[in-house]
Every structure is written in C-alpha cells, then in structure tokens.
Image (cartoon, grey):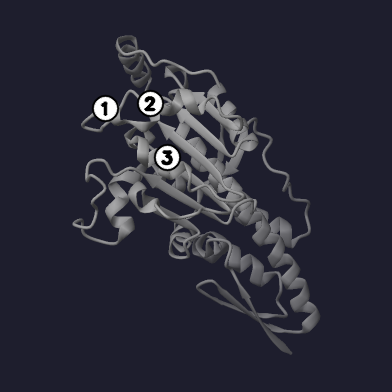
C-alpha cells in the first residue's frame, strides 16, 4: 500500500469536482480498490501502486479536458472512466479563439475582428482603432488568454491611462488593483468570461496577470508578455512613446483606442491620434480600423455611432 498526493493547480477545483461533487463521485466509484479523499485542490490516494498508476493516467486525461474546454460535464467524466472515445479536437467553430467559461466558444464575430486575430498572429505590435462595442478590446483579451494557455507568453499585462485621476492614484483607497478597477473593468469583464473566477484570482496573486496604470510602466522592459494598452486615445505623445518602448523579447503589444472619444482636457495632446499616420509607415506594425459594422451591442448603438461618425468622420491611414 502506498500513498500519493495529486494537485489541481491548473484547473478550477469547483469545476473539476462538479456540482455536489458529482465528478469526484464518478472518479471515486471508478476505483473502488483505492481510498480517495480530497480537500481544496489536493487529492490524496491510498492503495496498490498499479491501481494508483491507472488512476493517475485517468486523472491526467480529465484534467487535460478541463484545461482545454473550461468545462467538465459529468457525462464526459463517465465516458472517460469507461474508456469511451472523447472528442478532444475541439468544437469545429469558424474563427475560434479560445474556450471560455462552461465551454463557451469565444470567436471572432465580424470581418474586422477576424482581421485583428490574423494581425496579432503575424505581428508583435498591433493597433485596433474603433468605436465602443466593436469588440476590439474583447478580441485582444481573448488572444492574450490563448497565448497564455498555449505557453507562447508567461504573463498578461493590462494597462490603461487613468485620465480622470490624472494618473495620481495614491489618494484612492485599496491596493493597485482596487484603485484601477473603475478604469480596467472592461478588461476584467472579458477575463471573467474566459477564465474561472478562482483560477483568475490565483493568476492575479501570482502576477501571471498584472495590471498597471500607464504612468507606472516607466522603466520596465516587458519580456515574454502579452501587453494590452486599452483606451490609448487618452495617452499623451510622451506616454505612448514610453509605453511602446517597453517592448522586450518575445512580447506582443496590442493598443486599442477610439480617437473620437478623447477624454484629455486638451484633445490635441492625444499621442494616438497624432502618431498613427507615422506608425503606419513602420514595417511590422499592423493598424486596423473598426467601424459601426463591427458593433455587436444593442442594435441602437450601431445607429448612434454612425450618427456621430457622420458629424466627425475618422480619417483612416493605410496599413
């Protein structure tokens, strides 16, 4: 008789064990010769070495499925225990990016979103410019999560100018995440669609996912990272230059913004609006423009954006 400890470090234990421990019960009942107990993210198994080896193989199979699909139905666990063939190739959805919570398929939904996915795969620096609701930030976050899952990067860094507080966040209560919550909520919302809550919290605690106000990026060199600067229209010329020069080895930088919604008191100070034509001339940089056709919110949002664009049309620059 031997004892072995297994750790559920890569999946959400609540999802793994199932509602009312349904998945864990299936696992236990499939190995009646073993004593199996679990607590938090730890599974302790006592029994014959050969039986524990078989349990380990099945456990790895279940964990791999849960990691890939962010979902673990009891019927799937039962099929695995009964050696039935399981489709682990993924759902054959067009323009699939990553699996979200409960196995939800996250994919590009418009042509420009598909172009953004393609641009991120081919370039290390991509600008996505367009109106609210066009999916530019959501698609960028999905690509970041995919890169992290595929071990193409070691961390995700989310950055945004804190214009309303003029980058002076010290007077606000709480830690850095709590200070920045009002500014980064759209990024949080996207992450919560794609990563289980407990796992997401662990990633924040371990700095696998980091947040930073733009002013705090100075002096850093960002290697092996997928970095997203959101609401970049509110970055000044010097701030944008500072951010772009943080780029290190094996890094992906995605800059999103809407140059029709500049919140700076002096709108002429927006570094994004001023420098896009110059950046477009640099080989290896991709610039994509979203418009009202890409909006996937309420049908009225599209009409509202088109109305405002007719008043202040956005001048596009060649890629």
**Separation of disc 1 and disc 2 at Cα?**
9 Å
Task: Report whether residue 123 is seen.
Answer: yes
| Residue pictured at 62% horizontal, 31% vertical | 118
Place residue 190 in its image quadrant. Answer: top left
**Separation of disc 3 and disc 2 at Cα?**
13 Å
Please give the residue where the numbered disc 3 appears in the rendered image.
Answer: 241
Q: Are marks 1 and 2 in contact (CB under 8 Å)?
A: yes
In this rendering, the label closer to the viewer, 3 or 1: 3
**Separation of disc 3 and disc 1 at Cα?**
17 Å
What is the x, y in percent for residue 289? 48, 22
- Is residue 146 shown left or right of residue 263? right
Most extreme residue toward the left, as rendered? 171
**Looking at the image, is 239 positioned above or below residue 108?**
below
Please give the residue where the numbered disc 2 appears in the rendered image.
Answer: 273
Location of the C terminus (image quadrant): top right
Label 2: few (<14), some (14–19) or many (≥20) C-alpha neighbours in 10 Å: many
**Looking at the image, is 158 positioned above or below residue 3?**
above
**Looking at the image, is 58 positioned above or below residue 297?**
below
Looking at the picture, tell me which residue is in the foreground, 14 or 182.
182
Location of the N terminus (image quadrant): bottom right
């Amino acid at each position: 008789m031997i004892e072995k400890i297994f750790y559920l470090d890569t999946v959400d234990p609540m999802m793994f064990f199932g509602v009312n421990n349904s998945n864990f019960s299936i696992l236990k009942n499939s190995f009646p010769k073993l004593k199996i107990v679990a607590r938090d993210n730890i599974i302790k198994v006592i029994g014959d070495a050969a039986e524990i080896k078989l349990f380990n193989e099945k456990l790895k199979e279940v964990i791999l499925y849960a990691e890939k699909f962010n979902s673990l139905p009891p019927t799937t666990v039962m099929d695995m225990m009964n050696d039935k063939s399981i489709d682990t190739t993924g759902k054959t959805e067009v323009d699939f990016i990553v699996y979200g919570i409960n196995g939800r398929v996250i994919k590009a939904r418009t042509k420009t979103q598909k172009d953004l996915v393609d641009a991120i795969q081919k370039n290390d620096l991509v600008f996505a410019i367009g109106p609210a609701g066009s999916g530019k930030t959501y698609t960028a976050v999905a690509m970041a999560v995919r890169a992290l899952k595929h071990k193409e990067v070691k961390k995700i860094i989310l950055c945004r100018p804190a214009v309303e507080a003029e980058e002076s966040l010290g007077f606000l209560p709480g830690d850095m995440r709590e200070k920045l919550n009002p500014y980064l909520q759209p990024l949080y919302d996207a992450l919560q669609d794609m990563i289980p809550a407990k796992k997401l919290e662990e990633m924040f605690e371990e700095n696998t996912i980091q947040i930073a106000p733009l002013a705090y990026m100075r002096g850093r060199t960002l290697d092996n990272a997928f970095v997203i600067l959101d609401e970049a229209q509110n970055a000044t010329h010097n701030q944008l230059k500072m951010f772009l020069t943080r780029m290190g080895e094996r890094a992906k930088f995605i800059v999103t913004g809407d140059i029709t919604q500049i919140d700076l008191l002096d709108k002429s100070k927006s570094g994004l609006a001023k420098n896009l034509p110059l950046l477009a001339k640099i080989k290896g940089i991709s610039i994509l423009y979203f418009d009202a056709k890409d909006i996937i919110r309420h049908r009225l949002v599209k009409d509202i954006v088109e109305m405002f664009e007719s008043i202040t049309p956005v001048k596009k620059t060649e890629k």
